[in-house]
Amino acid sequence: MDKILGMHGRDVTLGVEKRPTATYMSRGQSRLSMIREKLLSEEEIRILDRKEGIKVSLIEPCLKVSHGWQLKKWNYLSKKFSYVLTERWNAVAHPYKRNELIQDVRI
């Protein structure tokens, strides 16, 4: 939380805690579904509903800030959906040492 406040963040809320599965740790996937809708503003939800991405920054587990992420809404045939960070997940998941990410260990 100190990192976020130091960046002049506000309304700090835990986005998600999850255990990375083999799929998330796979180099071929390069994405992480993780955002809960209640953390998004109405305008952000409208943008994502139009199938547009939103540029976001991510504070990695090692507290490095990485910029240029895309947040997108992925719709499934079952009418369910996920909010997904795309394009740069491999930079966080690999190398393992920087963020100490291990399959099935909560982040």
Image (tube, helix red, strand yellow):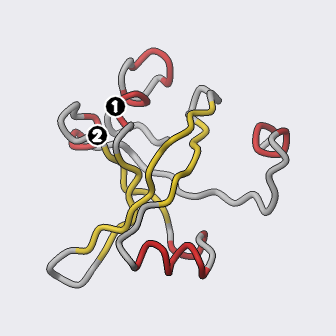
Residue linked to disc 1: 90
Amino acid type at circle 1 is Asn
**Res. 95 image quadrant:** top left
In percent of the image, x 60 and y 69: which residue is there? 39
User: As displayed, is residue 67 above or below residue 75?
Assistant: above
Q: Position of residue 87 (x, y in %)?
A: 34, 42
In the rendered image of this protein, does residue 73 appear above or below residue 61? Answer: below
Q: Residue 30 has which mark? A: 2
* Residue pictured at 63% horizontal, 75% vertical: 41
Residue beneath the point at 38% across and 30% down: 93
Residue 36 is left or right of residue 3, and the answer is left
Work out whether 20 lies above or below 41: above
- Dot 1 surroundings within 10 Å: few (below 14), some, or many (20 or more)? some
Instruction: Tell me how far mark 2 sits from mark 1, CA to CA.
Output: 5 Å
Q: Amino acid at mark 2?
A: Ser
Cβ atoms at labels 2 and 1 below 8 Å apart = yes
